[in-house]
Image (cartoon, rainbow, N blue to C red):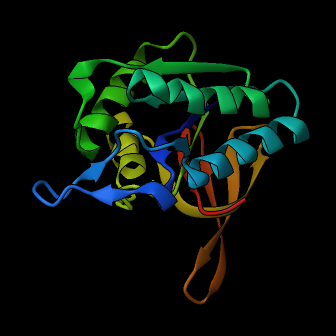
Amino acid sequence: MKILICVKQVPEITDVTINPETGTLMREGVDSILNPFCEYAVEMGLDLKRRYSDIETVAISMGPPQARTALMRCLEMGIDRAILLADMKFAGSDTWATALTLAETIKTLEGDFDLMLVGKQAIDGDTAQVGPELSEILGIPQIMYAVGVELIGNKKKVRVKREIETGNEIVEVKLPGLISISKG
């Protein structure tokens, strides 16, 4: 079984300023970190790897060369492999372009993934769009806002505990699928 975890490097939020002309984050000279929600997704993937046998974990990120730092953090945490998509053509990509680029790359990876994990959103944009867009492009089901995941049916399905306004909900879905993780 292969678990693919999409991660993003984001600016350390204590150091962020906004460009008054463009309304975008000024990232130059700002320390970057692994997006906290992506870190939750990494932790969930590693937890599944510990609980079940024969699981490979792969982290993938699209960003500038310095996004390598976020992937190094994933490897330090225990992820098996990491893939960085870095090209100046990607600079300034919106969520759809990001999802499309990731999806096209994922389609070319050796061996299919069974489960894709993403953080519920990135703290620098707060859009929560890349995960749902990825699942749409790849034609796989998605479950948002997971706080717990277990493999069932001989690893052919997942049972997900997710937070909703009125409490918790349990949802099952056949794999392959995408799950956004809310917290660790």
Depth check, front residue: 135 or 23: 23
Q: Which residue lies at the image location 48% right of the left edge and 58% below the top edge?
A: 13
Q: Which residue lies at the image location 72% right of the left edge and 40% below the top edge?
A: 45
Q: Position of residue 35 (x, y in %)?
A: 54, 48
Q: Position of residue 72 (x, y in %)?
A: 65, 26
Depth check, front residue: 92 or 174: 92
> In the image as oriented, which residue stretches furthest toward the left?
21
> In the image as oriented, which residue stretches furthest toward the bottom?
166
Image quarter hosting the N terminus:
top right
Figure label count = 0
Q: Which residue lies at the image location 68% right of the left edge and 32% below the top edge?
A: 74
Q: Is residue 1 visible?
A: no
Vertical arrangement, residue 13 with respect to residue 73, above or below: below
Q: Quadrant of residue 174?
A: top right
Q: Position of residue 69 (x, y in %)?
A: 58, 28
Vertical arrangement, residue 18 with respect to residue 137, above or below: below
Vertical arrangement, residue 129 with respect to residue 27, above or below: below
